[in-house]
Amino acid sequence: MEIQSQAFEVRRYKLADTRIVSEAMATPERGEALLRIDAFALTANNITYGVTGDMIGYWQFFPAADTDWGRIPVWGFADVVSSDVDGVAEGDRFYGYFPMAGHLLVQPAAVGDRSFTDGAAHRAELPAVYNQYQRCAADPLYRPEHEAMLMLFRPLFTTGFFIDDFLADNDFFGAGTVLLSSASSKTAVALAWLLHRARKGQVRVVGLTSPGNKRFVESLGCYDTAVTYDEPDALPKGPVVYVDMAGNGDLRASVHGHYADKLAYSCSVGVTHWESAALGGNDKLPGPKPELFFAPTQVAKRNKDWGPAVIAERLAGAWTPFVDAASGWLAVRREHGPGGVSGAYRSLLENRANPAEGLILSL
């Protein structure tokens, strides 16, 4: 029996163009399971997925039938509605990487007590971390009351965790200050909190933000100071490490021009300023060439150095106090249906989203 579903798609080279498509989901065959996507988070990180979709391969996870369009990946929860796979039963709940859609057909492989991997052929060459689905009943981070925080922050917190680890592993490239652009973004906040918690006294954490978000950034308590984009004279003295969450080409050039050789390291992470994104031209900038940070690379390194069990233990040890801290300032906003999803996406794309809100959506 077919199940009717819906999916939210964006035009790959014009992210402001969106549409809702209907699709029929067939009954799973042997080796397949059908998941009903219950809810997912939408953050600036997902806009980054769209902007860098061709460069990093994000469009390949959930390809649309029309190749001019794409399905932006999101993080969320889903329940198994039908399965012909041993170990993946109807009613099981999983956390993982999904399209902005109502359903996802997967081919579970490496099924275990804690997780499975989607073994679909088109995902085989993509980073494994995005293909794993965590079984909620066996997930050490899972709490029903923390579902919204897990959707909103788990991938971003994990990215921040590994940026913090990468910088510390390299002795902050000799710098005493870490400068974060788009300081109000959730990835930046997670990184700032980690730096403040574990590296206080070792490095100063400075947030670079818009005038409208400065008070919010200062209120978080994890930045030593906040500087707005229009006050370059207030930037801290070098040497600094620059972690670029904004991806704004003019801003990046300004920071590189300001510091030149006093810029110890330049790290590109996100493109929250997607409309001004500059993904090339880095060779001509003063100072070190910006390096793209790709979390799975550091994850792979630490899997060899520490092993997955130690990574999980360290992440869990930092996660719980972060949730306690973030719960004090974050308000969850839920939107449902095609209209709610489309409106929430547009508000984020047009930089109208409130940084103190977290968007939880469902189709």
Image (cartoon, grey):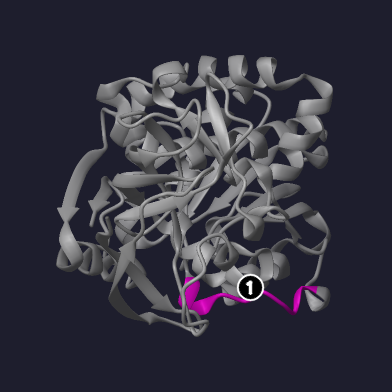
Residue matched to label 1 = 54
- Residue at image point 66% right, 41% down: 177
Q: Tell whether position 87 is magenta.
A: no
Crowding at label 1, few (<14), some or many (≥20) Cα neighbours within 10 Å? Answer: few
Mark 1 secondary-structure assignment: helix
The image shows residue 73 at horizontal and vertical percentages of 46, 57
| Left or right of 207 on screen, residue 204 | right
Q: Position of residue 337 (x, y in %)?
A: 16, 60
Q: Which residues are magenta?
A: 274-282
Left or right, residue 100 beside residue 110: left
Q: How many marks?
A: 1
In which quarter of the view is residue 257 placed? bottom right
Residue drawn at (24%, 52%), measured in percent from left and top? Answer: 362
Q: Is residue 328 above or below residue 352?
A: above
Q: Which one is nearer the viewer's eye here, 213 or 116?
A: 116
Q: Amino acid at mark 1?
A: Asp
Answer left or right for 282 relative to 269. right
Residue 223 appears in view: no
User: Quick check: can you spot residue 302?
Assistant: yes
Taking depth in this image into account, of 279 and 76 the one nearest to the observer is 76
Q: Where is the N terminus found, in terms of image quarters? A: bottom left
Residue at the image position 26 percent from the left and 28 percent from the top: 328
Q: Quadrant of residue 88?
A: top left
Q: Nearer the viewer, residue 112 or 29?
A: 29
